Image (spheres, rainbow, N blue to C red):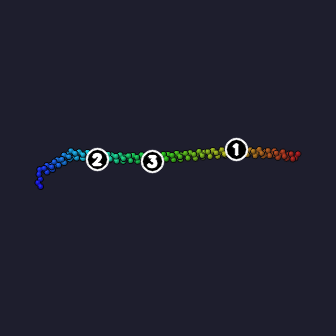
Amino acid sequence: MNPDLSVLLIVLMVWTLYFVLRKFFFDPINCILSQRDAAIHGTQEEARRRLIEVDKKSKAHSDSLKEARSESYRQQEGLRTEALKERSQILAQGRKGAEQVVGSAKQEIEEQVTIAKRTLQSEVNEIADGIVKSILR
């Protein structure tokens, strides 16, 4: 086998084609692919960062909502306790007023009973005197 010049020329043409394709085709494609890959990874990283930020804000919002609810429940409980105290005071005042009315009514009735007894006693005495006078006549 004699290596002739055509083999050397073919090898040289293949190497030239390789370098030309690499310089004008593969390097730009690889550059574009690496830029796209970097852009994709950058966008994905940005999306992850924003997702973490959204999760933090969502948790903060949820916590503030829970705090607002618990504060609302505490205020409701305070108002209810205050209303129950006021109700108890009103009931106590009503009872006291009713007891005073009942007491004054009892006293008035006792006075009326006393007056009625005196009146009846005097009438009984008059009737008894009248009966005694009738019998004695």
Residue depicted at x 82% and y 45%: 127
Q: Where is residue 122 in the image (x, y as percent from the top left)?
A: 79, 45
Q: How far apart are marks 3 and 2 (CA)?
A: 43 Å
Q: Where is residue 10 in the image (x, y as percent from the top left)?
A: 15, 49
Q: Which amino acid does label 3 sit on?
A: Lys
Label 3 sits on residue = 66
Q: What residue type is labelled 1?
A: Glu
- Nearer-N-terminus badge (1/2): 2
Residue depicted at x 56% and y 45%: 86
User: Crowding near pointer 1: few (<14 within 10 Å), some, many (20+)?
Assistant: few
Label 1 sits on residue = 108
Q: Circle 3 — which element?
A: helix
Q: Are marks 3 and 1 in contact (CB under 8 Å)?
A: no
Q: Circle 2 — which element?
A: helix
Residue closer to the observer: 80 or 7 = 7
Q: In which quarter of the image is the C terminus?
A: top right
